[in-house]
Amino acid sequence: MFHHPKKLVAGILASTMLAGASFAGELVINTDTSDPAPKAAFEALIAGFEAENPDVKVTWNLFDHEGYKTSIRNFLTADAPDLANWYAGNRMLPYVNAGLFEPVDDVWEENGLTESLASAQGSMTIDGKIWGVPYTYYQWGVYYRKDIFENLGIAVPTNWDEFKAAGKTLTDNGVTPITIGTKYLWTAGGVFDYLNLRTNGYDFHMALTKGEVAWTDERVVATMNNWKELIDAGFFLENHAAYSWQEALAPMVQGDAAMYVMGNFAVAPLKEAGLTDDTLGFFQFPVINPDVPLAEEAPTDTIHIPANAKNKEDAKKFLAYLARADVQTQINDTLGQLPINKDSEVGDDKFLQAGYQMLSSTTGGIAQFFDRDAPAEMAKAGMEGFQEFMVKPERMDKILERLEKVRGRVYK
């Protein structure tokens, strides 16, 4: 076959340029990590990657959170970067379903990530494929006043009966068992999630937040009945709907309340208010149903390759770098959170240590938060229902029927 020389030269040039591109690529990363600590962590992450890969030039587009939420679908569709940060669990489901994220099972297989990132594999998997690399999470659980427990002879409860007995000892001594502020509704979502995870397990949490289970299902009713036992026993702070989560720290600092079901970000303000490692402790939310493996709440941040990315080869190199134990140690040292790689190191902060041990060894799955795993409209209605239930538990059936109507609308 005869080639026109000009076309042939152009063809050879194009193929050598393409070959060159895979060596000297531009790698475009979009993130919403604009708060000071995440921004510093990403600056160091990108600098470290470029130092090891001098032939790759990283272009980093930084968005604020709200701007990112509204623009991610547009840029994934129209002008995809090579990498974009997001979140695990059902939060990534819409982009996976729309074909906008690339599966990265090969990155996991080639870099042994099914072992090193095992705790988060379930929350990264949809339809049997893995859709990104997680790099940070933080634990939820029960923060408590060690000194109050010790003074009243209360051992850390590991199961439901012990938990209820601890609450009774506290109320008998004029101490509210659990402080909470539900003015902003997500705190009630955390309590619901733990009761539901312990009553029904991780797969049920995921099915419920995906809209696959009726809110009137007997398993949801079982969760609510467990919650009602605590409400009826006077477990929760009075007038909680008037307090923000920060305002609800005060009763715990003052010794009027003994526990808080909360994320690890509460430790800093509790310490600033005067609690110390001697007075503040942490324990895993107790077992309710011994047949249900212990799942935890640990909101997980992730990085993904868009399906329309131009430089997937270098994007995969970046994900492999991001998954490394040393890299995750460094990022999380800056973030003050927990690495997912089980071979990473955690600073000597005892709450990070406790969370890392708990999450690294979990076999029951890592749930995202109720308002991350459920679509926005369902999350809002659900958490409004939880807050109302905590004030008027006798309305349980009406609340669940209302949530069931919302489910019918939201997941059409």
Image: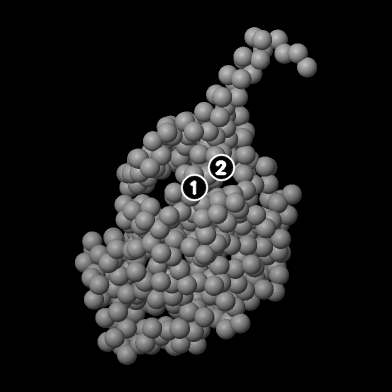
Residue at 70 percent across and 10 percent down: it is: 4
| Secondary element at tag 2 | loop
Front label number (1 vs 2): 1
Q: Nearer the viewer, residue 38 or 283?
A: 38
In this picture, residue 324 sits left or right of residue 257: right
Say above or below: 114 vs 174. Answer: above
Q: Nearer the viewer, residue 316 or 97?
A: 316
In this view, the residue farthest toward the left is 274
Residue at 31 percent across and 88 percent down: it is: 152
In this view, the residue farthest toward the front is 1
Residue at 56 percent across and 72 percent down: it is: 364
Say above or below: 274 vs 34. Answer: below
In this picture, residue 296 sits left or right of residue 181: right
Residue at mark 1 to residue at mark 2: CA–CA distance: 9 Å
Residue 315 pos. (x, y %): 51, 41
Which residue in the protein does label 2 denote? Answer: 305
Graded by Cα atoms within 10 Å as few (under 14), some (14 to 19) or many (20 or more), the crowding at tag 2 reads: many
Residue 171 pos. (x, y %): 38, 83
Say above or below: 266 vs 290. Answer: above
Q: Nearer the viewer, residue 205 or 410?
A: 205
Residue 222 pos. (x, y %): 63, 76
Residue 269 pos. (x, y %): 28, 60
Inspect the image, locate mark 2, and give the three-letter code of the amino acid beneath it: Ile
Instruction: Find out whether the residues at labels 1 and 2 contact each other: C-beta distance under 8 Å.
Output: yes
Q: Earlier in the sequence, mark 1 or mark 2?
A: 2
| Secondary element at tag 1 | helix
Residue at 56 percent across and 42 percent down: it is: 305
Q: Nearer the viewer, residue 232 or 336?
A: 336
Inspect the image, locate mark 1, and give the three-letter code of the amino acid beneath it: Leu
